[in-house]
Image: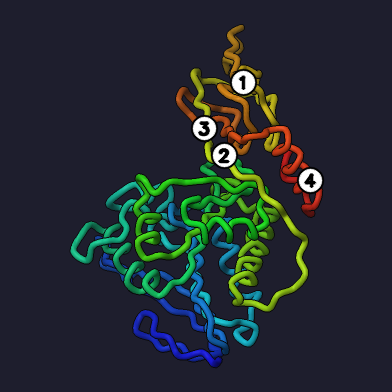
Amino acid sequence: MSNKKINICGTYIYPGEVANLALPLPEQYSCAPLFMPIKVLHGEQEGPCLVVFSVLKGTELNGLEIANRLVKAIKPSQLSGTVIAIPVMNIHGLTHYPSVLSSCHDLATCFPGDEQGSYGERIAHLITQEILMKADYCIELQTGGLNHNILPQVYCNFDNIHARELAKVFRSPVVTNVTLEGNHLRQTTEELQIPLLVYQAGEAMRFDENAIELGLSGIQSVMRTIDMLAKEPEQETIPIFSRDEDWLLAHKGGILHPTVALGQTVEKGELMGNVSDPFGADVIEPVKSPKKGIVVGVNTSPLIHEGLPIFKIASFLDCDKAETAIEAWDQNQPDSYIG
């Protein structure tokens, strides 16, 4: 069935059109106008509306690149439904790095927003009303933090069966459960009955070509599953599911010497690295794993301070089987992602 026109930000987009829009944002002290660029692909045929967004914190450059490449990779004639891509959701965070937002530390905490609220809440209100209210599915694109490299994985609420099934086809090696508690953005999408996937890979302020290509192909795989794109043969990836992930914090500042790598299984009490004194004192602090699991996040900076996250460990029912699955996935990648 032929698609119908759609109204976004006061602009009508007709079937078969590609639109570049600019959502006016609340004013800052400079009184200079600020806009959020939005790219819309409106397919010729009727179908779901998928919202893809990134740079919620201001540093997720991999996600910015994925969103832009997605729009370039698909023609409206190939599409059933609508793709709304927001490469940079937190304009202030990107342009004022390292400041995240003028009124709070995390835009995700501002949802669903308030038209008369703080600066962040006003932005969240605009996004909720203009974008999320039109969505059938959402995919957020994240990275690890600064100097924190993350093994590619998809996060979703396992209680949302539809989201969990879509996470399986994203072709990431790991799918991890997240709760709604404390994340107002997840709560908002859940209340709007929108399945939300969060793809996370690589580290902040860095481009990782492997992570970018995996994210792009993962989104397209999801789109084929929900009948937005024509089906085509794909190499099957069977992800492993994790219900628990924790960052291990440094108990001492100094220089980190890791002895483990992404994708590696560690036993409880196993040595993961050492922290040494940067000034040559003969003082070494061993870093040991608090549980059995797989390393899915590593601090890539040798210089660390006390309390800094240094290793992220995911728990699985069968860690040996999970490690084998991750190694098999990695062998099928253009470039190895794990150490």
Q: Is residue 169 visible?
A: yes
The answer to whether marks 1 and 4 mark residues whose Cβ atoms lie closer than 8 Å is no
Dot 1 corresponds to which residue?
268
**What amino acid type is highlighted by mark number 4?**
Ala
Query: At label 2, which amino acid type do we have?
Result: His
Closer to the N terminus: mark 1 or mark 2?
Answer: 2
Sooner in the amino-acid sequence: mark 3 or mark 2: 2
What residue sits right under mark 3 in the picture?
247
Q: Quadrant of the C terminus?
A: top right
Element assignment for label 4: helix
Mark 2, other Cα within 10 Å: few <14 / some 14–19 / many ≥20: many
Q: Residue at x 31, y 63 (%)?
A: 123
How many residues crowd around disc 4 within 10 Å: few (fewer than 14), some, or many (20 or more)? Answer: few
Q: Pointer 2: what residue?
A: 148
Is disc 2 placed on a helix, strand or loop? Answer: strand
Of the two numbered discs 1 and 4 on the same chain, state the one appearing first in sequence.
1
3 and 2 marks in contact (CB < 8 Å): no
Residue 202 in percent (x, y) is at 61, 47
Residue 251: % across, % down: 49, 19
Amino acid type, callout 1: Lys
Viewer can see residue 279: no
Which amino acid does the dot numbered 3 rest on? Trp
Q: Which residue is mark 4?
A: 328
> 275 above or below 78?
above
Whether label 1 touches label 2, CB < 8 Å: no
Task: Tell me where residue 119 appears, x and y as whole percent.
Answer: 26, 59
User: At 43% across and 58% down in the image, what residue appears?
Assistant: 95
Image position of 188 with respect to 267: above or below: below
